[in-house]
C-alpha cells in the first residue's frame, strides 16, 4: 500500500465520522424542536362592547275597508296625511319616509270566499320610515296610540312588527375589539404557562371568530333588532407555544 493511499483512507474515515456526528446532531435538534412544537396551549379571548343603534327602520302599515273603492282610497289618503303629521310632530320629516306597498283587495273576487262580507274593498298602505334619529323613532313608536285614537287602523293584510334598530358602525370598532380579545387570550395563556412551570412562547395558530351583535339586556325571546342598546361580541381562538 502506498503512503498516499493510506492517507486518503484516513481522510475518508474522518469525513464519514464527521458526517455521522453532524447528522446525529441534526436529528437530535429536530426531535427537540418537534417536542417544543408539541407543547402548546389553546385559549379563547373574549371582547365585548356596548353600543347604541345608529339607524332605525320602521314600516307602518294601515288599512281602510269600504264597499265603495273610492271611499276606501279616500280614507287611506286621509290616514296618510294624519301619519305624516304624526311623524312630523316627533321630528321625523317627509324626507325620512317613503310610501310603499299599496294593495287593494276585492273580496268578491276571491275564489275561496264563503259567507257574507261586511266590506267589499280592503286597501293597505305602508309608510317606510328610515332615519338616523333613533331617539325620535323610539318616542314616536311609544306614542302610537294617538293614531288609533285618530281613527287610523294599523295592521290589515300587512304586519306591523314595530321599528328595527340597526348598528352600522361595526367596521369602526373591529380593530380595537380584535386587539382586546387577543390580549385577553394572551393573559389566559400566560397564566397557564406559569401554572405549568414553563414560559409563554410565540403564537402557533390564531383564529378570529365571527362578530355578534346581541340584545344588550339578554332577556329571553328578546330580538336584538327591537332594542336600541346592543352588545357587540367577538371571540378569538389562539394557540401559544410553551417553552421549558
Image: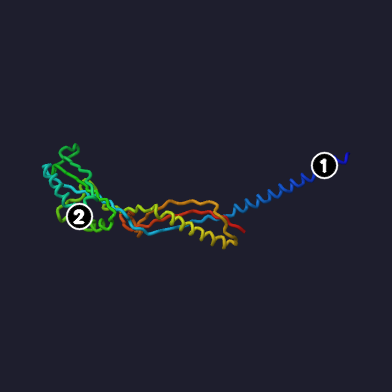
76, 64: nearer the viewer:
76
Quarter of the figure with the N terminus: top right
- Whole-percent x, y for residue 172 in the image: 39, 54
In the image as oriented, which residue stretches furthest toward the front?
Answer: 4
Residue count near mark 2 (Cα–Cα under 10 Å), binned few <14, some 14–19, many ≥20: some
* Left or right: where 186 falls relative to 80: right
Give the residue displayed 14% in from the left and 49% down from the top.
78
Looking at the picture, does residue 106 appear above or below residue 56?
Answer: above
Circle 1 — which element? Answer: helix
Q: Which residue is mark 2?
A: 88
Q: Position of residue 127 (x, y in %)?
A: 22, 48
Name the quadrant containing residue 53: bottom left
Helix, strand, or loop for circle 2? helix
18 relative position to 66: left or right? right
Q: Is 81 on the left or on the right of 212, as rendered?
A: left
Label 1 crowd (10 A; few <14 / some 14-19 / many >=20)? few
- Residue at the image position 44 percent from the left and 58 percent from the top: 47
Residue closest to the far right: 1
Residue 12 sits above or below residue 231 on the image: above
> What residue is disc 1 on?
9
Cβ–Cβ under 8 Å for marks 2 and 1: no
Residue at position x 23%, y 47% in the image: 98
Q: Is residue 65 visible?
A: yes
Q: Nearer the viewer, residue 28 or 92?
A: 92
Q: Is residue 83 above or below residue 6?
A: below
Q: Position of residue 33 (x, y in %)?
A: 63, 52
Mark sitting on residue 177: none
Between discs 2 and 1, the one toward the N terminus: 1
Count of labels in the image = 2
User: Label 2 to label 1, Cα distance in Å?
Assistant: 104 Å
The answer to whether any part of residue 118 appears in the image is no
Give the quarter of the figure containing the C terminus. Answer: bottom right
Amino acid at each position: 500500500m502506498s503512503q498516499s493511499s493510506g492517507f486518503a483512507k484516513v481522510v475518508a474515515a474522518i469525513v464519514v465520522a464527521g458526517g455521522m456526528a453532524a447528522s446525529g446532531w441534526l436529528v437530535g435538534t429536530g426531535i427537540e424542536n418537534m417536542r417544543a412544537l408539541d407543547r402548546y396551549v389553546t385559549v379563547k379571548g373574549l371582547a365585548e362592547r356596548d353600543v347604541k343603534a345608529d339607524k332605525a327602520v320602521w314600516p307602518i302599515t294601515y288599512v281602510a275597508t269600504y264597499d265603495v273603492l273610492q271611499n276606501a282610497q279616500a280614507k287611506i289618503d286621509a290616514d296618510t296625511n294624519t301619519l305624516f303629521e304624526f311623524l312630523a310632530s316627533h321630528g321625523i320629516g317627509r324626507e325620512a319616509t317613503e310610501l310603499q306597498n299599496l294593495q287593494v283587495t276585492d273580496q268578491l273576487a276571491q275564489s275561496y270566499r264563503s259567507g257574507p262580507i261586511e266590506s267589499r274593498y280592503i286597501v293597505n298602505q305602508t309608510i317606510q320610515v328610515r332615519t338616523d334619529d333613533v331617539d325620535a323613532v323610539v318616542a314616536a313608536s311609544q306614542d302610537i296610540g294617538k293614531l288609533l285614537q285618530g281613527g287610523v287602523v294599523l295592521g290589515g293584510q300587512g304586519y306591523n312588527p314595530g321599528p328595527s334598530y340597526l348598528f352600522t358602525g361595526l367596521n369602526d370598532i373591529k380593530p380595537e375589539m380584535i386587539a382586546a380579545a387577543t390580549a385577553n387570550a394572551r393573559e389566559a395563556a400566560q397564566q397557564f404557562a406559569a401554572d405549568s412551570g414553563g414560559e409563554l412562547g410565540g403564537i402557533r395558530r390564531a383564529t378570529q371568530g365571527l362578530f355578534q351583535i346581541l340584545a344588550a339586556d339578554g332577556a329571553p325571546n328578546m330580538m336584538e333588532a327591537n332594542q336600541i342598546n346592543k352588545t357587540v361580541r367577538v371571540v378569538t381562538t389562539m394557540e401559544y407555544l410553551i417553552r421549558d
